[in-house]
Image (spheres, rainbow, N blue to C red):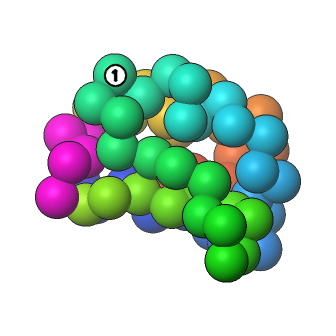
Amino acid sequence: MSVKINQEECTACGSCVSNCPFEAIKIADSTNKAEIDCSTCQECGACIDECPVSAISA
């Protein structure tokens, strides 16, 4: 499973950031969108369930 964020759908609400147990997601300064650090992400899916606009998928 590879977790991906649809940048066009992301509203940068921060739900995924605050719910990631591995601190693998941040809001990028350059794009003001959520970004996943693939080297830290454990693909647990917690962010998928928390995204209110369904911008995150596996």
Of residue 9 and residue 14, the one placed in the foreground of this image is 14
How many discs mark residues in the rendered view? 1
Of residue 21 and residue 49, the one placed in the foreground of this image is 21
Q: Quadrant of residue 4?
A: bottom left
Which residue type carries mark 1? Pro
Q: Is residue 29 left or right of residue 26?
A: right
- Name which residue lies at 71% across and 75% down: 31
Q: Bounds of the magenta span?
A: 39-43
Q: Judge the density around disc 1: few (<14), some (14-19), many (≥20) Cα neighbours within 10 Å.
A: some
Q: Is residue 20 left or right of residue 49?
A: left
- Name which residue lies at 55% across and 35% down: 17
Which residue is most to the front?
29
Q: Is residue 30 left or right of residue 37?
A: right
- Name which residue lies at 60% across and 64% down: 28
Q: Position of residue 22 (x, y in %)?
A: 28, 30
- Residue 42 inside the magenta-drawn segment: yes
SS assignment at label 1: loop
Q: Position of residue 46 (x, y in %)?
A: 43, 27
Of residue 29 and residue 10, the one placed in the foreground of this image is 29
Mark 1 = which residue?
21
Q: Is residue 49 above or below residue 35?
A: above
The answer to whether any part of residue 37 appears in the image is yes
Q: Is residue 42 above or below residue 3?
A: above
The answer to whether any part of residue 49 appears in the image is no
Q: Quadrant of residue 49?
A: top right
Q: Position of residue 29 (x, y in %)?
A: 66, 67
Secondary structure of the magenta portion, mostly? Answer: loop
- Residue 1 inside the magenta-drawn segment: no
